[in-house]
Amino acid sequence: MSQSALITGVTGQDGAYLARLLLDKGYRVYGFMPRRSTDTSWRLRELGIESSIEVIHGDVTDLSSLVRGIQASAATEVYNLAAQSFVGSSWDQPLLTGQVSGLGAANVLEAVRLVRPETRVYQASTSEMFGLIQAERQDENTPFYPRSPYGAAKLYAHWMTVNYRESFGMHASSGILFNHESPLRGIEFVTRKVTDGVARIKLGLQPELRLGNLDAQRDWGFAGDYVQAMWLMLQQEQADDYVIATGQTTSVRRFCELAFAHVGLDYEEFVKIDPRFYRPAEVDILQGKPAKAAQQLGWHARTSLEELVSMMVEADLERVSRQMKGRTG
Ligand code: NAP
Ligand code: F7E
């Protein structure tokens, strides 16, 4: 029987890479997406897959639209990637973040239970649940301590996933993914903000780059590698929870150093600290321990940080140059 997948959050960074992966594997891919007044499909277009996705309009805060989406698609796998995913905004919109990133996941689980309980479910959990870390390297057994409304909402979604698995025997897995980036990353996240800034500075469009806490450290990988882990989780006989990470941690400062050096510039001349980008509570450091994923899924991060930085800076140089040509041409 041919496989079909419904992806919530299909227009986001991970949704786009996952959709491409599943299409390449021969899946029928349904993109569950809210109707917006502006176009949100630029990532699907960049990957050349927009016309291959079957669109179902809906919103994860609207249970009836999820029920309809699961009925219409008869999906054998559901990937719940929809979220208000920007940690910084979660203090400004804590209730919305809870409704989308927390209750939204409960709606997905409930819709699957009601309509097609045999459907396999992936929940996009996050290293932000570890927050104020309780172990030097975090794995599936490390206690959680979220430090933002986003982290707290995702922790609720994580435990609901575990509970639906244990209460109803559903094949529901939670992927605890550490930060993963790409040329398709949203511009508000620090890596893409830096690589876009590097491109604009190099091409003479911007004099400086304003950032917040340069000492924060993250375990950064490439999104293209991480969506493979999502798929692998749903191919296991038993559903489970997995930490997905590179195992290395790097500061924002070092990321800047690498990105500016890629175009022959010294970050110290261009990066300015702006307290507006500090957060009410910071996650100082994250470093994952993906041993279980390596052992049980055979998954490893394949892209190094240097390769990731180079891929992102090159993509932004090309994008910004294209925009400049568009303006003058
Ligand atoms: P993203 O680029 O911010 O994408 C989020 C997606 O969710 C967008 O397609 C967005 O659509 C959609 N969405 C927002 N509100 C929705 C709603 N009410 N109903 C349906 N869809 C809605 O995030 P990402 O980086 O791809 O991450 C994918 C998932 O993994 C998210 O759940 C995120 O929290 C989680 N995660 C990400 C990372 C990471 O480092 N990237 C790490 C761990 C976990 P619009 O654009 O139209 O709003
Ligand atoms: O911040 C610091 C900031 O916004 C990383 C989401 O995908 O990954 C992401 O969450 C660090 C923080 O990502 C700026 O204070 C300094 O310490 O890129 P970020 P995040 O908060 O780690 C997790 C795993 C998710 O699940 C989330 O959905 O960088 N930082 N200066 C800055 N951050 C931003 N955004 N902008 C700055 O100017």
Image (cartoon, rainbow, N blue to C red):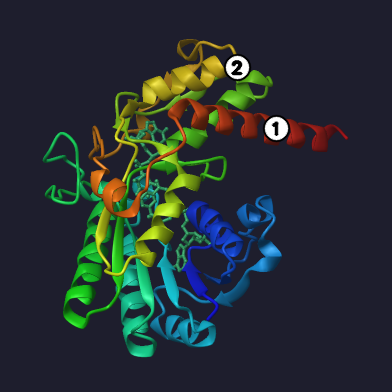
Identify which residue, 39 or 79, lies in the foreground. Answer: 79
Q: Residues within 10 Å of mark 2 (few under 14, many from 20)?
A: some
Name which residue lies at 63% across and 34% down: 315
User: Is 133 left, or right, of 253 in this rendering?
Assistant: left
Amino acid found under the numbered disc labelled 1: Glu
Q: Which mark is residue 263?
A: 2
In x, y percent, where is residue 223?
A: 47, 46
Say above or below: 226 vs 167. Answer: above
**Counting residues from the N terminus, which is met first, the one under dot 1 or under dot 2?**
2
Identify which residue, 67 or 214, lies in the foreground. Answer: 67
In x, y percent, where is residue 262?
A: 56, 18
Q: Quadrant of ligand 2?
A: top left
Label 1 – label 2 distance at C-alpha:
13 Å
Residue 291, quarter of the rendered image: top left
Residue 300, quarter of the rendered image: top left
User: Is 268 left, or right, of 16 in this rendering?
Assistant: left
Amino acid found under the numbered disc labelled 2: Val
The residue that disc 1 covers is 318
Residue 100 visible: no
